[in-house]
Image (cartoon, rainbow, N blue to C red):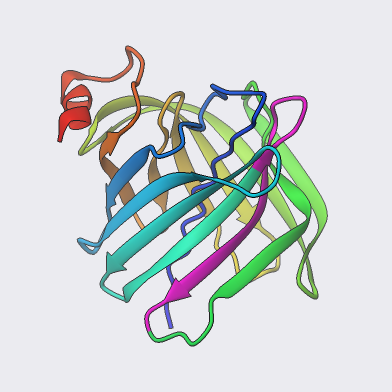
């Protein structure tokens, strides 16, 4: 069964806010459309641990519907770590829970072009290695507008639970596009983006 894993990882800290490339506003919502005319609605929620944020997403696509909750954290250096994900697809009996030990270094802020390698990550009983490559800036057009983004590529060496993924990250809005599922931002609420937004992007605030 083709499953939808959207590793849209966000974070929050009780002491640190405004982290670049990851929105931190509790209750902010983001709406996406996918390759197969699927839709994804995401809301930011507070986590149960210090410096933790949960991004809850509900999706409907050609392969069915379901939800996911991805969890990330921020350390004292403002670096972003992916902690785990819980997901559920229509027809499943129980949710799939994946926890990373240790947490995966996702974004070493401020972002610079290069590769971060995370060795010896355990996902349950499985060991894996992952590299996160910051490819550089790219201007992209999605339904919400035109955005200046940084392209981040996540590549797993062994594990089939988590797909390789490419994210186009806006400084204020976080992911405005992701592959392999082709999610593109269509609108958002609870956020005020910076001057990089076009008028077409700004008006999505009022939809």
Q: Which residue is found at the position 20% from the left and 61% from the top? A: 37
Q: Does the magenta stretch include residue 84?
A: yes
Q: Is residue 58 left or right of residue 36?
A: right
Magenta: main secondary structure equals strand
Q: In this view, does 75 lie above or below 129?
A: above
Q: In which quarter of the image is residue 60?
A: bottom left
**Highlighted magenta segment, given as a residue range:** 73-90
Residue 146, position as x, y percentages in the image: 26, 26
> Where the C terminus falls, by quadrant?
top left
Residue at the (46%, 24%) spot, across then down: 171
Q: Which quadrant holds residue 65?
A: bottom left
Q: Is 1 covered by the magenta stretch?
A: no
Q: Position of residue 95 (x, y in %)?
A: 54, 76
Is 120 placed left or right of 24 in the picture? Answer: right
Point out residue 16 in the picture as x, y percentages from the top left corner: 64, 23
For the image, the number of numbered tags is 0
Q: Along the line of sight, which residue is nearer the eye, 125 or 181?
A: 125
- Place of residue 195 in the rendered image (x, y in percent of width and height, measured from the top left): 32, 12
- Name the residue rendered at 39%, 86% in the picture: 91
**Furthest residue toward right:** 120
Rendered-image quadrant of the N terminus: bottom left
Name the residue: 55% across, 55% down.
Answer: 70
Left or right relative to 15: residue 182: left
């Amino acid at each position: 069964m083709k499953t939808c894993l959207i590793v849209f990882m966000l974070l929050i800290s009780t002491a640190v806010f405004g982290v670049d490339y990851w929105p931190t506003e509790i209750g902010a919502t983001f709406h996406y459309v996918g390759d197969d005319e699927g839709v994804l609605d995401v809301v930011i929620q507070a986590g149960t641990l210090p410096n933790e944020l949960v991004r809850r997403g509900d999706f409907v696509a050609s392969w069915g519907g379901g939800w996911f909750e991805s969890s990330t954290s921020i350390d004292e250096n403002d670096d972003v770590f992916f902690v785990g994900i819980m997901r559920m697809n229509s027809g499943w009996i129980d949710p799939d829970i994946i926890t990373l030990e240790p947490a995966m270094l996702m974004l070493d802020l401020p972002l610079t072009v290069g590769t971060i390698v995370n060795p010896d990550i355990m996902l349950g009983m499985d060991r894996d290695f992952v590299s996160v490559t910051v490819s550089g800036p790219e201007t992209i057009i999605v339904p919400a507008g035109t955005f200046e983004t940084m392209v981040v590529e996540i590549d797993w060496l062994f594990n089939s639970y988590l797909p390789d993924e490419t994210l186009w990250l806006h400084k204020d809005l976080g992911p405005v596009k992701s592959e392999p599922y082709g999610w593109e931002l269509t609108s958002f609420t609870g956020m005020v983006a910076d001057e990089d937004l076009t008028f077409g992007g700004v008006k999505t605030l009022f939809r």
